[in-house]
Every structure is written in structure tokens, then in C-alpha cells.
Amino acid sequence: MTWLQLRIECNESQTNTIELILDLLGAVSITFEDGANQPLYEPPLGTNPLWQLTRITALFDGDTNQQQLVEQLTAQYSGSGPLNYQIQLMEDKTWQTEWMKHIKPVAFNNQLWVVPQGFDIPEPEATNVLFNPGLAFGTGSHPTTALCLEWLTRQNLNGKTLIDYGCGSGILGIAACLLGSKENHMVDIDSQAIEATTQNARLNNLSSKQIQCYLPETFPHVQRDVLIANILATPLIELAETFSTLLPSRGLLALSGILAEQVEAVQSAYETWFEVISIESKDEWILLNAVRK
């Protein structure tokens, strides 16, 4: 099988943002290595240091459009200066299998499980979201996805309608549906994400009315009760006014994909239309929970 390998050299401060961008663009695997022969000795407990110059290697399906991938990567990246990257096709039939060895079912608030296809369901009485790990647009393991899933478990979604903006694998919207929402609009700029969401919805026995998928240009701008967006700070800021039109008064909003140092800028962009109720964190990532004024 053919794989598309993308390698990026960046400094330590850029790694979290680039990792999230690659994950949102559908990377099958993401690895880090030393880019400048800088050894890391035993770090203090609770820390996860990276090299000052880090080489990030991401694998994508071989059918991925190279030009489109680079365009989306550079459009999402907000760092100073151009990205230093290399891209090439590779033949390797084992990499995806190796990556899949590291995934497993994950629980959120002892109420919701995200279960890769092929695993036994750990808690049959809980809400279980099944997903195809071969699609690899999001598995629930990233802190931003975990924040969103935990937030969903705390909401009363019975009979509600929801928008998942930047749906990726569809895990968030599918989880919301299984937790009680009745009709969810799933939006993503990537047609592969739309296909992944559609397949994962079928895997969870959800109908095309319960999970409706759209590219942004085909998305019907109608109000829904809840909007969740796990993307990045820059597009979140740009979408603030658009999101304000998609929720009624007291509609619920959850925003993630935000680094701690970006919270103030995101809050400022939304304060005209939204009241922030809480700020939640996991590792260095933030979720803003707000309501429409």
C-alpha cells in the first residue's frame, strides 16, 4: 500500500499546533524525533519535553491530494515564517498496522466509551461510539477531543439539534447523537472527513437524517441548539460572527483546539455575542464553554 509521508521541521513552541493541524487534516500517524542531535536526559516527573528543533513525521493515505494537503496545512498554520517541510510517497504495508496497535477503547466521565472497530465493548451498558481506526481522522485520544467528549457527557442533549463544525471523523457529533441529540449537522472542509463521518455514522447505526454531512459551501446556515467546534484558534476567531448566527439566544457553544496562550484572543472575538460560562483545560489545551446572549 502507498503512503504519503510529510516531514516538518519546527521549533519546540510550534509542535502542539502543528500536531493538531496534522491530526485535523487526517494524519494516520504522527511521530516526533530530534532534528538537531540534541539528547533529552531524564525529565522531571509530569513533564513531556521536546527537542528545540523537532522533526514531525506524519503519514497520510497515498491517495491524498498533495497540493490540497499542503494548501490546507499552510492556510491553518499561523506561525512566523514559512514551514520547512518535505513530502514523498512511500511503499510500506505495515505502518498503519503498527499505529493501530497503540489504540484502544477510551472512557469519558465513566459514561461514554470510544471503541475502535474490532475491539470488544468494555461497558455494554454505557454509551459506546464505534469508529473505524483505519480512517484515522480522530480517535478521542487527543486532549482537545477528550475535552469535547467530556463536555458532551455533561449536557442534556435529549431532543436537541447540534452542529459539529470541523467534524473530522465525526466522533463528537456521533457521540452527541448517541447521548440523545436528534439531528446533527456535520461540517468539514475536507471531503475525506465527510466520508469518514458518513462511514462512522453507519457503523453506529445512525441514519442520514440523524447525521447530515456538509462541506462549508453546501452547509445550510440554520440555527441549532448546540454548536461544538474542535479546530484551531485562528479559524475559531474568524468564525465568531458566523457561529453567532447559528445559535439562538441561550444556545450552547463549545470551542476547543485552543492553546492556553490563545484563550484571551478567542474570548475577545466572541464576547460581542457570547457569554463564557467556563474554561476547561487538559494538558496545554483549552475548551471554552459559552452561551449565546
Image (tube, rainbow, N blue to C red):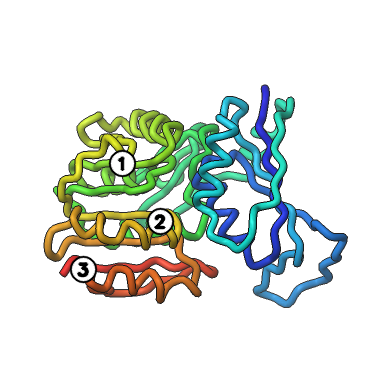
Q: Which mark is residue 273?
A: 3
Q: Is residue 13 above or below residue 19?
A: below
Image position, residue 14 (x, y; %): 62, 62
**What is the CA distance from the residue labelled 1 to the residue labelled 2?**
17 Å
Above or below: residue 283 compared with residue 197: below
Mark 3 or 1: the one toward you:
3
| Residue 186 badge | 1
26 shown above or below 56 = above
Badge 3 density bin: few <14, some 14–19, many ≥20, Cα 10 Å: some
Q: Nearer the viewer, residue 66 or 131?
A: 66
Tell me if residue 193 can be seen: yes
Q: Secondary structure at mark 2?
A: helix
**Picture quadrant of residue 42:** bottom right
- The one nearer the camera, 176 or 222, is 222
What amino acid is at disc 1?
Met
Q: Quadrant of the N terminus?
A: top right
Left or right: 77 in relation to 161:
right
Q: Residue at x 58, y 62 (%)?
A: 79
Judging from the image, what secondary structure is the residue with disc 3 in?
loop
Q: Is residue 86 left or right of residue 194?
A: right
Residue occupied by mark 2: 235
Neighbourhood count class around disc 1 (C-alpha, 10 Å): few under 14, some 14–19, many 20 upward = many
Position of the C terminus by quadrant: bottom left
Q: Are marks 1 and 2 in contact (CB under 8 Å)?
A: no
Residue lying at the far left of the rendered structure: 249
